[in-house]
Image (spheres, rainbow, N blue to C red):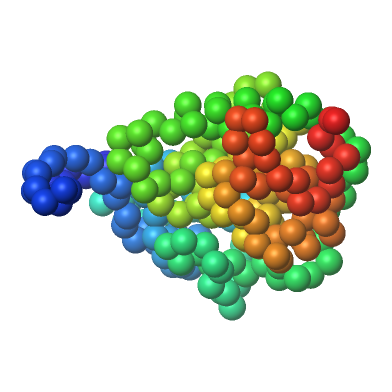
């Protein structure tokens, strides 16, 4: 079994002096996704929660709707492939588009198509202080980051506590892992708020919509296309979130004044 972190040694130069250090760094490996016996794609990812990554990817791509469609999911002996067996045939997408996701994300979803998603434009209502509290909770859940740095974290909250968190070198992988963990553990809270350390690009917004999360919070910036999509979907998109400040780019009415 491959661990998500690896011991390294490095030399640091500072103020005309050299120092030696031993540390941990995040692991990045290629992992293939095999569906019903056919290899589909290869993820570049951190080898933790790989079953959830595979199942969540299929869900976020709209290829499965519930866990009952999955007959079996297992990681191969060397952690280089995840086998997913469905109880029905599924057509492999013929065209994968590379996204702006770090470590080479891919999707077959038409991100510019009219969304088949409907949100209540006025709920849930969230007080501004809750946003800062959720960001603090996200930091507390970053166990791998504290050991290695260089890794993204995303979390699903019901507005009061963190229900699921996932870490990966690819920010898009974290939301696939969140989706997979929701399916595998049947965790679907009525109120769904996503918090992430990663930049909000179009594929991140699409995955949040697929998870039926009307509020998406990031430590950093959204892209222009993600803002446009958030406005069309009716998602409250929040960026540069800190303990006492944040920017709201769409659907401000959900945040209490």
- Give above or below for 15 relative to 94: above
Work out whether residue 96 or residue 28 is closer to the camera in this orientation and state it: 28
Expressed as whole percent of the image width and height from the top left, the position of residue 58 reads 59, 55
The answer to which image quadrant residue 236 occupies is top right
Q: Horizontal placement of 215 versus 157: left or right?
A: right
Q: How many marks?
A: 0
- Give above or below for 40 relative to 142: below
Q: In the image, what residue occupies the spot 70% across and 26% down? A: 130
Quarter of the figure with the N terminus: top left
Expressed as whole percent of the image width and height from the top left, the position of residue 224 reads 70, 65
Work out whether residue 79 or residue 199 is closer to the camera in this orientation and state it: 199
Q: Horizontal placement of 223 versus 76: left or right?
A: right
Residue occupying the far top of the picture: 160
Work out whether residue 33 or residue 35 is closer to the camera in this orientation and state it: 33
- Give above or below for 252 relative to 54: above
Quarter of the figure with the C terminus: top right
Expressed as whole percent of the image width and height from the top left, the position of residue 251 reads 84, 47
Q: In the image, what residue occupies the spot 36% across and 48% down? A: 150
Q: In the image, what residue occupies the spot 84% across and 37% down? A: 254
- Residue 236 shows up from this direction: yes
- Residue 75 shows up from this direction: no
Work out whether residue 139 or residue 232 is closer to the camera in this orientation and state it: 139
Q: Horizontal placement of 154 versus 126: left or right?
A: left
The answer to which image quadrant residue 126 occupies is top right
Residue occupying the far bottom of the picture: 95
Expressed as whole percent of the image width and height from the top left, the position of residue 103 reads 42, 62
Residue occupying the far front of the picture: 15
Q: In the image, what residue occupies the spot 83% across and 66% down? A: 114
């Amino acid at each position: 079994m491959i661990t998500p972190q690896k011991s390294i040694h490095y030399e640091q130069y500072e103020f005309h002096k050299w120092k030696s250090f031993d540390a941990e760094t995040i692991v990045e490996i290629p992992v293939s996704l095999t569906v019903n016996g056919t290899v589909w794609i290869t993820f570049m990812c951190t080898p933790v929660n790989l079953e959830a990554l595979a199942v969540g990817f299929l869900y976020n791509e709209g290829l499965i709707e519930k866990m009952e469609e999955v007959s079996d999911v297992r990681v191969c002996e060397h952690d280089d492939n995840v086998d997913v067996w469905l109880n029905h045939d599924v057509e492999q997408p013929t065209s994968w588009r590379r996204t702006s996701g770090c470590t080479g994300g891919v999707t077959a979803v038409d991100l510019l198509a009219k969304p088949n998603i409907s949100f209540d434009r006025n709920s849930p209502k969230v007080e501004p202080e809750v946003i800062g509290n959720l960001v603090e909770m996200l930091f507390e859940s970053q166990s791998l980051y504290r050991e290695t740095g260089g890794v993204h974290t995303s979390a699903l909250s019901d507005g009061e506590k963190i229900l699921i968190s996932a870490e990966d070198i690819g920010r898009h992988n974290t939301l696939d892992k969140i989706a997979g963990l929701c399916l595998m553990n049947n965790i679907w809270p009525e109120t769904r708020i996503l918090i992430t350390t990663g930049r909000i690009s179009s594929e991140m917004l699409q995955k949040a919509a697929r998870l039926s999360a009307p509020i998406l919070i990031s430590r950093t910036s959204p892209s222009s296309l993600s803002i446009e999509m958030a406005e069309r979907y009716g998602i409250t998109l929040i960026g540069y979130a800190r303990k006492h400040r944040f920017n709201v780019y769409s659907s401000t009415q959900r945040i209490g004044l």
